[in-house]
Image (cartoon, rainbow, N blue to C red):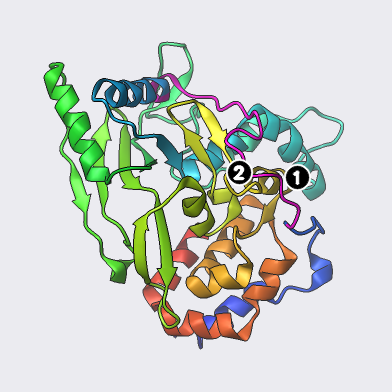
Amino acid sequence: ARFASFAAFTSQFISIPEDSLETNGGSNGMRPPGRDASNIEVDLTAEEKELFDLLRTVTTECGMKSTLRVAGGWVRDKILASKEFKQNRVSLDLLETGVMDASKPPDTENEAMNRITSKFKGEKVASNQNASKSPDNSLSVTVPVDIDIALDDKLGREFADELNQWLSDHGRETHSVGVVLKNPEKSKHLETATMRVNNYWIDFVNLRAEEYTSDSRIPDLMRIGSPQEDSLRRDLTINSLFYNINEGIVEDMTGRGLDDLRRGIVATPLPPLTTLLDDPLRVLRSVRFAARLRFTMSDELRTAAADERVKAALEQKVSRERVGSEVDLM
């Protein structure tokens, strides 16, 4: 075996000398959770605007009261590519690492895009052979993009069916819907409806709340949750942000996600030990995002990750295959 144990492998990343890391502080300072605490402007491509306009129209004309929220990596990466974050984080990072000459203005757009780690790669990638000009003359990637959309009042397949019915009623092309059923053994805790709309693969899923048993990383209680409950159950604050499609605003329900993005901190929404013991795979996810984004794990998270109970839980609850998958993504 490549590693004697999962715990030993993880400790290679967690047991880092204190003086080898920059000090960014912890993540204890919280702003009040807010629906638009930041006034961050998300730059949507023409295709994204078209998609979100369609979803808003379907919601209104079908009489649904659903609020649609984009969740996960798309939101994080869009914010990292925004003007504010290009100015406030990227130049500082490049100066500190010596990549950028302090006497020269940074090529912030390209450098910012290099920080992005999810399947969404931004809209302006000049070298991409699959790129084409959009109506607003921006360069848009034509490779299908994954977007996760969370619903606050129904299952994903229910909304997907409503969407297809609206498309059919208006003489437009309908789309096949793949339903990924609940499969706790594969970490699929609620069913997800997947369909391709235009240039996007969309996963529709409801907001969720989860509770775990003491001997498994599989939740034994799951229900439709509130936006704040859903954000608190996520692995990291930087992955807990929402983009409210109905209102066109960024929502930071933990009150910490945007601040941690600005400061380059990897931290958990709940106390780290609670989050890691609930799902010890999050230890490796924390390391992955810190490494890929050149962020620093908070002191509290690093302490919890080195806890013997977390190391034991990682060995006992997480399969070697899942550990391998996370390592591959690093």
- The answer to whether residue 217 is magenta is no
Q: Is residue 33 magenta?
A: yes
Q: Which residue is mark 2?
A: 115
The residues bearing labels 2 and 1 have C-alpha atoms spaced at a distance of 10 Å
Q: Is residue 72 above or below residue 40?
A: below
Position of 232 relative to 33 (above/below): below
Badge 2 amino acid: Arg
Residue 115 appears left or right of 63: right
Mark 2 in CB contact with mark 1 (< 8 angstroms): yes
Residue 45 vs 229, above or below: the answer is above
Q: Nearer the viewer, residue 293 or 260?
A: 260
Query: Residue sitting at 64 percent across and 72 percent down?
Result: 13
User: Which element type, helix, strand or loop, lies under badge 2?
Assistant: loop
At 58% from the left and 76% from the top, the residue drawn is 10
Q: Amino acid at mark 1?
A: Asp
Number of residues whose C-alpha sits closer than 10 Å to that of mark 2, classed few (under 14), some (14–19) or many (20 or more): some
Q: Quadrant of the N terminus?
A: bottom left
Magenta segment boundaries in residue numbering:
28-48
Which numbered marker is on residue 309? none
Give the residue pinned by disc 1.
93
